[in-house]
Amino acid sequence: MTDGSTIRALREFVREREWAQFHSAENLAKSVAIEAGELLECYQWDGAADDDRARDELADVLTYCFFLADKLGADPEDLILEKLVRTRSKYPIEKARGRSTKYDQL
C-alpha cells in the first residue's frame, strides 16, 4: 500500500512548521473525527457530492490517520491488515455474504 514516502513527506511538513508539539494522540484523534465530519458534510444534502471536494476532505482524514498511526508507532498498512484478519473471523463468508447485519446478529 505505501512505501514510506507519504509518512516521510508528512513528517517533513510537520518538522518544517514545528507543529509536532500540537500532535498528541488525543489531538490527532480529534482531528480525524473533525475532518471525517467535513467529508460527511460533502454528502449532507445530496448523495452526489462534488468529487474534488470529497477527495480533498478524504485526503485530510487520511493525513490525520497517518499522523496518528505514526504517533502510535504503527504502520497504517499493518494496522489495516491486522484488523482485516480479526474482521474476517467476525464476518465469515457463509454468514455475511450480501448482508449488512452486524456480526453479533449473524
Image (spheres, rainbow, N blue to C red):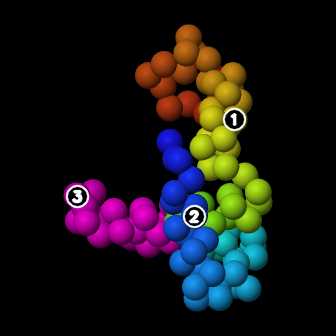
Callout 2: few (<14), some (14-19), or many (20+) C-alpha neighbours within 10 Å?
A: few
- Whichever of callouts 1 and 2 sits on the residue coming sooner in the sequence is 2
Callout 1: few (<14), some (14-19), or many (20+) C-alpha neighbours within 10 Å?
A: few
**Disc 3 element:** loop
Residue that appears at 60% across and 79% down? 14
Please give the range of residues in magenta.
35-62
The numbered disc on residue 48 is 3
Callout 3: few (<14), some (14-19), or many (20+) C-alpha neighbours within 10 Å?
A: few
| Residue depth check, mark 1 versus mark 2: number of the one nearer the observer | 2
Q: Position of residue 70 (x, y in %)?
A: 69, 61
Residue that appears at 73% across and 85% down? 21
Image quadrant containing the C terminus: top right
The numbered disc on residue 8 is 2
Residue that appears at 65% across and 88% down? 18
**Disc 1 element:** helix
Magenta span: predominant SS is: helix
- Whichever of callouts 2 and 3 sits on the residue coming sooner in the sequence is 2
Q: Nearer the viewer, residue 38 or 69?
A: 69
Q: Quarter of the image holding residue 45?
A: bottom left
Q: Are marks 2 and 3 in contact (CB under 8 Å)?
A: no
The numbered disc on residue 82 is 1
Residue that appears at 67% across and 68% down? 29
Q: Nearer the viewer, residue 33 or 59?
A: 59
Image vertical order of residue 17 relative to residue 4, above or below: below
26 sits to left or right of 87: right
Q: Position of residue 92 (x, y in %)?
A: 61, 17
Q: Amino acid at mark 3?
A: Ala
Mark 1 → mark 2, Cα distance in angstroms? 22 Å
Queried whether the magenta region covers residue 58, the answer comes back as yes
Q: Amino acid at mark 2?
A: Arg
Mark 2 → mark 3, Cα distance in angstroms? 34 Å
